[in-house]
Amino acid sequence: MNKRAVFLDRDGTLNEDAGYPGNFGSISIYPESFEAVRRLNEAGLLAIVVSNQSGVGRGLFGEAEVEDIHRKMAAAFASRGARLDAFYYCPHFEGSADPGYAAACECRKPKPGLALRAAADFGIELARSYMVGDKPDDIAFGRNIGAMPVLVLTGQGRGSRKRLRAQGPAPGHVAAGVLAAVRWIIRREGETR
């Protein structure tokens, strides 16, 4: 368990937050995301996407659609020389009409389940890792797993910043977007080695 990872929220962090996108055509990846992930790859940090996808539990689309979006996202990043190492998502929604998705789970951010699975799969040292996202649940998730949480001001980030100032938890750093967050992470990693 000595690998370090940067956990990346999907909607609002790597791509525009389009609500409940059920297909890849509904996804608009921020252009800077490609360079950000490429820099993580070059720095030897795992780039792992962690995302709440309650649209599955809400019956708006199925897990096959989420997995198709993730395959196509991975291919889009690969075509730009960037590697997303893995995707982990929570399909649950407590108000779901489908009992398989209605139960309380341990994988919905800010709970730590997605990171615990990734840590087991990749041998990640969570305390030496980072979480980058635009929502309070992303920041709380980072704190809950012992990682350094970074708030980006894309997506819902500006509104989240106000809520976090009032209610917490505080992010470890605030960045304009995912590329600025990655630059800060890489600088910080260079200082702590």
Image: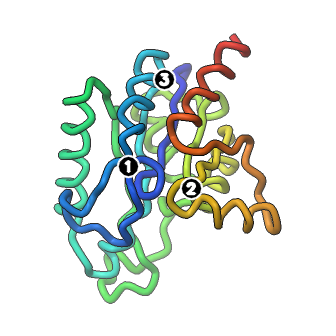
- Looking at the picture, which amino acid does disc 2 mark? Asp
Q: Where does label 2 land, which residue? A: 134
> Is residue 110 visible in this depiction of the protein?
no
Label 1: few (<14), some (14–19) or many (≥20) C-alpha neighbours in 10 Å: many
Q: Is residue 33 left or right of residue 25?
A: right
Work out how far the residue at label 1 is from the one at label 3, CA to CA, in angstroms.
17 Å
Residue 101 on image: x %, y %: 35, 75
Residue 127 on image: x %, y %: 66, 32
Identity of the residue drawn at 23% across and 68% down: 22
- Which numbered marker is on residue 45? 3
Residue 13 versus residue 43 in the image, above or below: below
Identity of the residue drawn at 64% across and 61% down: 158
Q: Nearer the viewer, mark 1 or mark 2?
A: 2
Q: Where does label 1 land, which residue? A: 88
- Looking at the picture, which amino acid does disc 1 mark? Tyr
Q: Secondary structure at mark 3?
A: loop
Label 2: few (<14), some (14–19) or many (≥20) C-alpha neighbours in 10 Å: many
